[in-house]
Amino acid sequence: QQIQEDLNKQLFDNLVSFLRQSHSEFQEKTTEWTCRMKSREIPTAALVLGVNVTDHDLTFRSLSEVIQNNITPYIALLEAKDCPGIKNLMQKLMGQLMNCYIDVDSLEDEDYVQVSENRIRCSMTSLINWYENVTKKTGSETPSKKRTSSSRHWQSPPVVVIFKDMESFTTKVLQDFIVISSQHIRELPLVLIFGIATSPMIIHNLLPHSVSSLLCIELFQSLSCKEHLSTIIDKLLLTTQFPFKLGEKVLQVLINIFLYHDFSVQNFIKGFQLCIVEHFYSQPLSVLCCQLVDAKKRVNYLSHDQCENIRRLPSFRRYVEGQVSEKQIALLTADSCLKEVTLKLLEDLHVYHENYVSVLRCLHVFTSSLPKYPLGKQIRELHCACLENQVWETEEYESSLQLARMLNKSDLVTMLQQCVEIFVSSSGKEFDKTVEKLKDFLTQFQKLEAEAFQERDVSVSSQKELQKKTDLYHLQKTLLELKESRRSKKLTKFEMLRFEVVDYIDSLVRNYLVPADHKTLHEIVYFNTASVLREHLNAAPRIALHTALNNPYCYLKNQALKSDGGSISNKAPDICIVYKLHLECGRLINLVDWLEAFSTVVMAAEGPNADAASSDQVDDIIHARFIRAVSELELLGFIKPSKQKTDHVARLTWGGC
């Protein structure tokens, strides 16, 4: 929430400035406001937030707090689902502004709101009278109180109405409200804020020109949801502040859901929280997933079972296999030795993360400025590539190096300066020599620039000498020498230095951007179970429905519902019995045959009495149960009535799940 507030700060500041401007015009009764009153224009902010609708609630909540703290206490947030008509809109508007309770059941029947012991009619006249009374009370306060309130709000603060989802409002409701409000703009300083998910053109699509001309519209654009996500990943994942990390497959699942489903940063955060819960619930060694200071204390208190869990980790097994035989025996038998090594490995893992983040940012400085972005434009794409495998072995990385070897001098100098800033501010302790080396490169570039000026002067003088040689023989000889020197041209000092810089960055990448799964004990801090995350986040309703109807024991956990293979238990719910029977049928299902089969299964528990029941004398209760189960199947979309035969239904689903 703090990160999103920081990202929206510029947007909110612009909105506050807009509200203050329109508000001050109303206060001072300037010529511009008088002209606006004559034309009956309502100050309107068109706030384009993007298609990530699930994030809008948090944005509007933060915006209303900012407006209340800086502009006005009179704010109403309206949603289309609560305002099907102008009467409902006025009830909601007055109810929120007057802080009164509205009975939802009475919205359709009554045209009033209950304020204290009085019933007020929901109309613009009542709203204006209420506003005048409230502002008069504020104006009649004692000077000390008045000073306190005026430090935050003006004497006659505007009334801000926020339409959270403008696209969902009906055209008639918006038209009526805008026309009515414009007729009373002299008495009520109303300001509208339209929350828009698609495009500002929706205003002109919903409203005719005669109505939109009553609005004085100013456009405000929020940051894109992709920029929000990149900042979230940068602040939450690419930092040593939080020890918990996401594996490459898990991070890719969350990013894919974001990009291909909803663009919702809030849902990404919920998925991140789910990963944290799942990791600490399923990983017995997650007790060591904490800050290094706390981990050092906790290692000493590990039980024998926890030590055995460490020995079972695949990464620790690889580490043991690389040790000498005496060390292997000590690690596998002595818990004290294991704890010492575990502490050292956790320290190494912490140092790895510090170095990884700094070098990743430095590499991103280079790759993000290359054409076509072989390794991606965003740092999250580069992070996923480094987690997946050894990035220097990929074709994208090779093409990035080739493009980097063609950068001009100004770009290279700028990138090196940015890398120096990254390594200087890094918490890693191994980058002192790296900073010195990068500064040395910058110094060499400066020297090359000075030499370039001298060479330029020499070339100018040589050209002048060439012009002086009027003798044809000497002229031809000089031109041939120039041509031969161009053919056997060697790399310039700048090109050699550029190759040296790129090779040095490449060496940093190979040393510090090793994939996390190559590090020992990475399982303690990294959550890698992407399949569990998919089960929770990637909905598969058809599979879940088939499982529930075909095997109700899976969800109900009732021992009586256990069945062998394809047998149908008479203890199962009616809809499960009907569903299993319908799986045995073809495209058209005869309702009479279906009912007889259902009756046979249900009556099977009654033993010999079941034989006495004939298909013509089905019990009324069983008949009613069957009709209800079939209706439920139709509601779920498994069958539909058939026009070919009145006593048949058509089956709609085929194949196994």
Image (cartoon, rainbow, N blue to C red):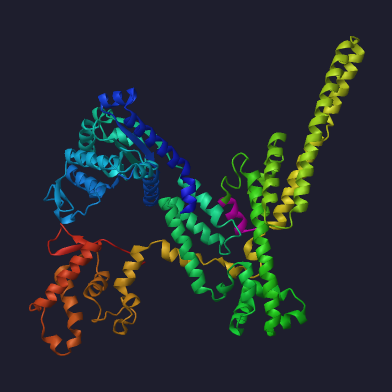
Taking depth in this image into account, of 422 and 596 the one nearest to the observer is 422
Q: Is residue 181 toward the left or the right of residue 298 in the image?
A: left
Q: Position of residue 115 (x, y in %)?
A: 18, 51
Q: Is residue 555 magenta?
A: no
Residue located 10% across and 81% down the image? 614
State the image coordinates of residue 336 (x, y, percent, origin top left).
69, 82
Q: Which residues are magenta?
A: 380-390
Instruction: Decide if residue 99 is on the left or right side of residue 529.
Output: left
Of residues 431 and 29, which is closer to you in this image?
A: 29
Count of marks, rendered view = 0
- Residue reaching furthest to the left: 617
- Say if 205 sits above or below 293 in the image: above
Residue 491 visible in this rendered orientation of the protein: no
Quadrant where the C terminus is found in the figure: bottom left
User: Does 367 sit above or below residue 469?
Assistant: below
Q: Is residue 392 left or right of residue 100?
A: right
Percent x, y of residue 396 = 63, 48
Determine whether 391 is above or below 585 in the image: above
Which is nearer the eye, 633 or 246? Answer: 246
Report x, y in % for residue 6: 49, 48
Q: Magenta stretch mostly in which secondary structure?
A: helix
Q: Quadrant of residue 496?
A: top right
Residue 70 or 303: which is nearer the viewer? 70
**Residue name at image x 79 percent, y 31 percent:** 449
Q: Quick check: 210 above or below 432?
A: above
Q: Residue at the spot x=19%, y=42% of the render?
A: 86
